[in-house]
Image (cartoon, rainbow, N blue to C red):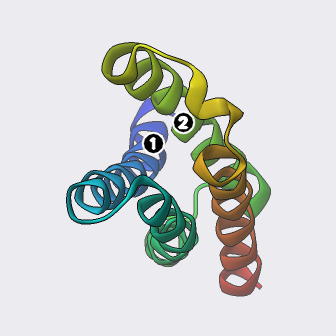
Amino acid sequence: MNIQKTIILLAHGFAGWVLCAASMGIGMSVTSLQNALIVHAVAAPIFFAVISLVYFRKFNFTTPLQTATAFLAFVIALDFFVVAMLINHSYAMFASLIGTWIPFAMIFSSTYLTGLMTVN
């Protein structure tokens, strides 16, 4: 896979991460942290299912497993370096099931399943 294809793949992952960040930012400004985390956990797989549907229909450079792995790795890296290190100055978010691990699992699952249904 060349650099242009990699950029397209990561741009889709970035779009999903931005939507998740927006859901957390808006959620925390209008409701409690717990409610924002619940909304984020529900919204994240929906965002990534739609984004991966677009990716697989238009580009489809990678397999569903490769795409789900790439999206998840990119989201984890951005959460670690941007959210935890730069914004929160704390890694406490990674101790939360609803805050990180459930959305991570759902992002991977929704991307992978969308890929399987779209490609086959």
- CB of mark 1 within 8 Å of CB of mark 2? yes
- Judging depth in this view, the residue of 45 and 61 nearest the camera is 45
The residue sitting at 67% across, 51% down in the picture is: 104
Q: Nearer the viewer, mark 1 or mark 2?
A: 2
Query: Residue tagged by mark 2?
Result: 74
Badge 1 marks a residue whose secondary structure is: helix
Q: x, y percentage for residue 103?
A: 63, 57
Cα separation between marks 1 and 2: 7 Å
Position of the N terminus, as image quadrant, is top right
Badge 2 marks a residue whose secondary structure is: helix
Residue 63 visible in the shown view: no
Residue 74 found in image quarter: top right
Residue 93 visible in the shown view: yes
Earlier along the polypeptide chain: callout 1 or callout 2?
A: 1
The residue sitting at 57% across, 33% down in the picture is: 93
Q: x, y percentage for residue 100?
A: 62, 45
Name above or below for residue 57 compared with residue 37. below
Q: x, y percentage for residue 46?
A: 51, 77
Q: Give the amino acid type for the residue marked by disc 1 in the picture.
A: Leu
The residue sitting at 40% across, 28% down in the picture is: 83
Q: x, y percentage for residue 54?
A: 44, 75
Q: Give the amino acid type for the residue marked by disc 2 in the picture.
A: Phe
The residue sitting at 74% across, 56% down in the picture is: 105
Name above or below for residue 58 compared with residue 22. below
Query: Residue tagged by mark 1?
Result: 10
Residue 61 found in image quarter: bottom right
Name above or below for residue 90 compared with residue 55. above
Residue extending farthest front:
32
